[in-house]
Amino acid sequence: MWGDADIRASRLGTVYEHGDEDDILHLVELAEPSGDDIALDLVTGLGHVARALAPRVARVDALDPDGEMLREAESLAREHSLTNMSFIEADPTSLPCESGSYDIVTARMALRHLGDGVQFVREVHRVIKPTGRFLITDSLAPPHADLESFQKNLMSIRDPSHVKSYSLAELEGLLERESFDIDLIEIYPKEHDFDSWAKRLGADHDIVRMIAKMLQSASARAKRHFRVVEKADDLVSFVTWMILVRARPALES
């Protein structure tokens, strides 16, 4: 899947959309980095988070299953004169990393692309130190089945690499079962100007029209949840709900 040109184009669209500097800097601050830390950024894409972490830690390993995107990330790191970054092409559910080797693990817009979230989190638990911090940022699935189904259909049309968004309850349960304690949760809306969002998407006109029609013909309940704004016959904007979670390996009782 990862090397497919269409999948790469869709991922790049989301990478640029979620490349907001304030959002990344907030994630980095919550990771509590120090100069001795070793960090791992999973499904790094173009390496936005990894580059933001690099000046604050001893080393960052940026991992992605798509070698072409990794080469772009490595080129960007060189442009920023960052010399403490390593780039690893690997499956994020089977990490080629030693157990207990990372102080910080970040997964920004990563979980959505994975068919096996359990194995992914299990591998993070294996490679993170007992005192480590695991940070996840991703789209949040609505708590109601009809809204979740609507969002899943919308996301799959817009981004073929999108597998699943997790609800708050699902994410809490997943982390707890894999022996993580959550110590911070933030939920917030991310507003999308539709025209700008569609251009970043890079999709053909028919797909853009299909997405616009889905949002404009949605139920009143869905329009309220996604805060759909229309002007005359045009779709102006909508929101997706995001979640940021910080978790730490559970302490043995």
Image (tube, grey):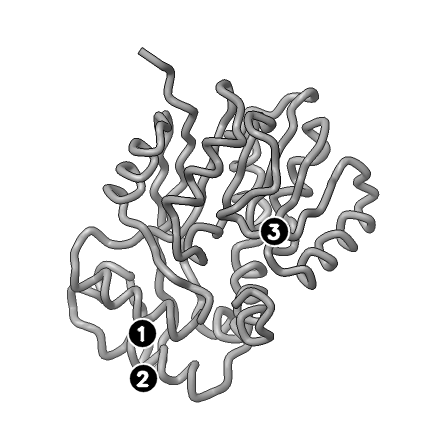
The local secondary structure at tag 3 comes to loop
- How would you rate the neighbour count of disc 3 (Cα within 10 Å): few for under 14, some for 14-19, many for 20 or more? some
Q: Position of residue 61 (x, y in %)?
A: 67, 39
| Image location of residue 97, percent across then percent down | 61, 37
Q: Residue at x 60, y 27 (%)?
A: 101
Taking the image as shown, residue 158 lies to the left or right of residue 203, namely: left
User: For the view shown, which residue lies furthest in the bottom direction?
Assistant: 206
* Helix, strand or loop under label 1: strand
Label 1: how many residues lie within 10 Å, few (<14), some (14-19) or many (20+)?
few
Q: Is label 2 in a helix, a strand or a loop?
A: loop
Q: Quadrant of the C terminus?
A: top left
The residue at the point 44 percent across, 71 percent down is 160
- Disc 3 to disc 2: CB gap under 8 Å: no
- The earlier-in-sequence mark between 3 and 1 is 3
* Cα distance between the residues tagged 2 and 1: 7 Å
Residue where numbered disc 3 is placed: 90
Q: Nearer the viewer, mark 3 or mark 2?
A: 3
Q: Amino acid at mark 3?
A: Ala
Q: Quadrant of residue 211?
A: bottom left
Q: Residue at x 69, y 56 (%)?
A: 70
* Along the line of sight, the residue nearer the viewer: 141 or 16: 141
Q: Give me the disc on residue 196.
A: none
Residue depicted at x 51% and y 79%? 203
Q: Which residue is mark 1?
A: 230
**Of the residues shown, which amino acid type is indicated by label 1?**
Glu
Tag in front: 3 or 1: 3
The one of 44 and 216 positioned closer to us in this rendering: 44
In the figure, 84 relative to 112: above or below? above
User: In the image, is residue 151 above or below residue 177?
Assistant: below
**Which residue is labeled 2 in the image?**
233
Left or right, 143 with respect to 11, comes to left
Q: Are marks 2 and 1 in contact (CB under 8 Å)?
A: yes
